[in-house]
Image (tube, rainbow, N blue to C red):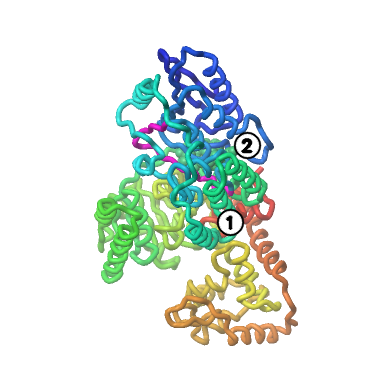
Amino acid sequence: MYVKTELDGNCLVIYITNPPVNALSQAVRQAVVDVFKTVETNLDIEAVILTGQGRFFSAGADIKEFGKGDLLPSLPDVLDYIERCRLPVIAALPGTALGGGLEVALSCRYRLSVAAAKVGLPEVNLGLIPGAGGTQRLPRLIGMKKGAEFVTSGKPVGAKEALKLGIIDEIVETDLLEAAKAFARSLIGTTARSPISKMGPPEDWDKAAFDALMAKTKAKARGQVSPIAALEAVEAACTLSFEDGLKAEREIFKTCLENPQRAGLIHAFFAQRQAKKIPFLEAAVPQDVKSIGILGAGTMGSGIAIACASAGYDVLLFDAHTDALDKGITRIHAAFDHNIKTGRMSQPAAHSAKACVTPISDMQDLADVDLVIEAIVEKMDVKRAVFEQLDSICKSDAILASNTSYLNINEIAAATRRPDRVLGMHFFSPANIMKLLEVVRTEKASAQSLATAFAVGAKLGKIAVLSGVCDGFIGNRILKTYRAEAEFLLEDGALPQDIDRVMREFGFAMGPFQVSDLAGLDIAWHNRRKEDSTRDPNARYVDIADKLYDLGRFGQKTQAGWYDYKTGDRTAYPSPLVDDLVIAASQAKNITRRDISDTEILNRIMEAMLSEGRAILDEGIALKASDIDLVMIHGYGFPKYRGGLMFYGGITDK
Ligand code: 3H9
């Protein structure tokens, strides 16, 4: 049953009934059309309400149906039935209406909602544009500028904002359906307002303003086509009749549907949902976590503290050095103040988050916390000593997590008497912004401990992915092969600026050498020295970065690294000195430099990463190929519209 109806006197309530989110699958569309046909013939019905069963009005078209051909009736056909209905249809939103869900609501004559409802057109995030009149109706209703914002950002707004914009006519604080019925009955015998399709084009249409918006959208899209396509459809709404605009929208929608970016983005959407589905954690009940101790008030520890406090956890921030602790607290407060300034957080929310963070200089104060996240120096002996100490201080059921980027957490766990409650929670810098969290499964970690880490990750708004223990876990291990191959390419004939350009054109925000200049060549140099004793002496080692370090070229911080920089200017200028160094490095190894095409650069880097990805899968470090995709997208800037590394390489989960 995809639609349920209830007749209350002369008022028909139609419920979309397709749990969990009332997606508008073919069966739902057919059922809605069938009901509307009966409305036409049953003249006892004098008022019609369309609503959703449960907490969603509808999350839009059924994403699983894309790419499966035309499954009739189409959503635009359904909207046609609703709009042409002999009675004015009232949409009653019991919760969220997204994409096609909002388009359905916009085809109704009036819209009422609960206060918790959200509305939005997020199709752009799936590589699509609204394809059932959303780009034509919404700008007519709320104007070109606001309409453009909706379709290009894909961000939903709350009911209050929707009311202000005129998307919703009324927020109902009492019983939604009773209010909707009363509203519908009050219309009987009156002339209802015209449908949105009969409204004139947006009054704020301004070609110059639109062109500026398009230029901004193109710059921001970085290779993704859907935001630009969505804006083109808005232009059609402003310059064509409704019917012609609808045709233009349909054409643009179809082009997006066939673009591989749509498949990549939809893969990423489902990958995110799949990452939570871990067979051996299904039965585990997460522990209750209210308070979190964070060890280390450096950049990473402070970022984690901001994320935890923003999510409402009580945070005890420990650092053995008073200076570092003071700096950490200052950094945290500055971040919350910045959030207020930029409108990301309300003043009361930021103040209460600030109040959640308590600085402590005595580790004994961690005795009662539910979870500890350690973010101190990357030295095994120091970490083992700290975990041994934590083990004796913290209550017996507290979970102890390390934020190490590459150390063997099994060894850290072995320093405690609770190895089942020790695991990795690897955040990415800045930890309050970056979405990725690698939850690292140690040999003895219990299902409950891992489930708890996932639950905390979800509360922090992170995309948590399970990783096994290995050097660098999933992400840094792949990153290492990326960097290594980029450096091999240098010796073989490419220059840093060639490689960086190719990777930017592929969709990364920055190339590997720009990233290296940003992160600091000195830090990477120290990391390499730690690996000297264990590195395979027969492995190919490129020493150009060491030579740059010797010259004091540490990257942006010294205004010289792989590139040259000017004061107050972060532009990376290719450096003749670095070019000479690169050429000299090839000569020193008797490598004859040759022209390396852009295609070779891309293919070699991708193949190096893919080969590591395959090994990570084979070894069981990642459970699924799509988990690797998520790590690369959300931790390393792999373009989401390409679906992630493994998807790009044609490797998907069975
Ligand atoms: C569109 O409408 C195009 C039209 O303009 C034109 C057409 C011609 N379809 O995220 P959750 C599943 S494009 C199918 O874990 P939450 C999801 O996979 C669409 N399935 O819950 C998951 O399944 P499972 C535009 C969907 O509460 C389950 O529902 N709409 C759809 O954290 C629960 O999802 C969007 O882009 C769907 N549309 O978040 C909205 N949506 O249990 C996309 C969800 O098997 N959806 N599922 O893993 C979302 O943003 C979130 O899912 C939502 C709920 C906010 C709705």
Is residue 456 among the parts visible in the rendering? Answer: yes
Q: Which residue is the site of mark 2?
A: 65
Q: Secondary structure at mark 1?
A: loop
Q: Is residue 425 left or right of residue 29?
A: left
134 part of magenta stretch: no
Over which residues does the magenta segment extend? Answer: 110-127
Of 288 and 587, which appears nearest the observer? 587
Q: What amino acid is at disc 1? A: Gln
Q: What amino acid is at disc 2? A: Glu
Q: Position of residue 353 (x, y in %)?
A: 28, 53
Give me the C-alpha separation between circle 1 and circle 2.
Answer: 22 Å
Looking at marks 1 and 2 on the same chain, the residue that comes earlier in the sequence is marked by: 2
Q: Residue at x 73, y 81 (%)?
A: 593
Whether residue 498 is situated above or below residue 54 in the rendered picture: below
Is residue 537 among the parts visible in the rendering? Answer: no
Q: Secondary structure at mark 2?
A: helix
Q: Is residue 357 left or right of residue 559?
A: left
Q: Position of residue 476 (x, y in %)?
A: 54, 62
Whether residue 494 is situated above or below residue 10 in the rendered picture: below
Looking at the rendered image, the quarter that the N terminus falls into is: top right
Label 1 lies in ligand 1 vicinity (Cβ under 8 Å): no
Of 556 and 231, which appears nearest the observer? 231
Q: Position of residue 546 (x, y in %)?
A: 56, 81
113 part of magenta stretch: yes
Near mark 1 (Cα within 10 A), the count class, few <14, some 14-19 or many ≥20, is many
Looking at the rendered image, the quarter that the C terminus falls into is: top right
Q: Residue at x 43, y 20 (%)?
A: 47
Q: Which residue is the site of mark 1?
A: 224
